[in-house]
């Protein structure tokens, strides 16, 4: 399979998960199909969107065939899981503020599934991503407390995973960053 777009990856991943759930595809071949989808950033992002937001019960269980497929692109996947934990916890704050119970429930589902997936994939590599994200969040909170503007650069300091830029790009406020920090600290504790 050649490189696919983010949108194609969502559609392909949803279909794949449905085929597996209905028993139309052997779970023995699933890791190969998943690995093919997640081999690049658009595919990995699309798979995780379908997996974490969809209605598939597979995403509640994190079976070995999913973990084996994702492990083929560990660096991409661990970075995206880290970002999903932050995004979903930060968006939960916004949805609660706005009184949108449906979107709040969806964000909470993604946060829960992301943490459970992280626990299933627990590795030193994932722990390293969580620690880098935690450091970036702490730095952003410090800058906001000091009233400093956050310099928008593609790469900040020792942030090898570009998490500072990620946080700045989404313009999270203090309350959202605090929720994200708590979620990441909890995720660190759950896999340490």
Image (tube, helix red, strand yellow):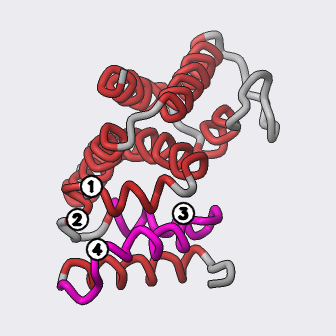
Label pair 3/1, CB-CB below 8 angstroms? no
* Rendered position, 112 above or below 129: below
Which secondary structure, mark 1? Answer: loop
Closest to the observer, 3 or 85? 3
Q: Earlier in the sequence, mark 4 or mark 3?
A: 4
Q: CA distance from mark 1 to mark 4?
A: 12 Å
Q: Earlier in the sequence, mark 3 or mark 1?
A: 3
Q: Name which residue lies at 27% across and 43% down.
A: 116
Q: Position of residue 79 (x, y in %)?
A: 56, 44
Q: Name which residue lies at 27% across and 55% down.
A: 62
Q: Which residues are magenta?
A: 23-52
Reading the image, the residue beneath label 4 is 27
Q: Name which residue lies at 32% across and 24% down.
A: 186
Q: CA distance from mark 3 to mark 2?
A: 17 Å
The main secondary structure of the magenta stretch is helix
Reading the image, the residue beneath label 3 is 44
């Amino acid at each position: 399979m050649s490189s696919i777009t983010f949108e194609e990856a969502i559609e392909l991943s949803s279909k794949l998960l449905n085929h597996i759930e209905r028993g139309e595809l052997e779970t023995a071949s699933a890791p190969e199909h998943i690995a093919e989808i997640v081999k690049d950033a658009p595919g990995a992002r699309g798979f995780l969107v379908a997996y974490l937001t969809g209605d598939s019960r597979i995403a509640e269980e994190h079976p070995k065939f999913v973990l084996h497929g994702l492990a083929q692109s560990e660096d991409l996947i661990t970075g995206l899981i880290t970002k999903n934990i932050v995004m979903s916890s930060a968006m939960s704050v916004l949805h609660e503020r706005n009184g949108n119970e449906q979107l709040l429930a969806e964000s909470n589902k993604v946060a829960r599934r992301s943490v459970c997936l992280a626990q299933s994939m627990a590795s030193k590599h994932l722990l390293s991503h969580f620690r880098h994200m935690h450091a970036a969040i702490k730095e952003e909170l410090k800058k906001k407390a000091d009233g400093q503007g956050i310099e928008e650069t593609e790469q900040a300091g020792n942030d090898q995973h570009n998490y500072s830029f990620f946080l700045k790009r989404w313009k999270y406020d203090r309350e959202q960053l605090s929720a994200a920090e708590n979620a990441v600290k909890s995720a660190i504790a759950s896999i340490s």
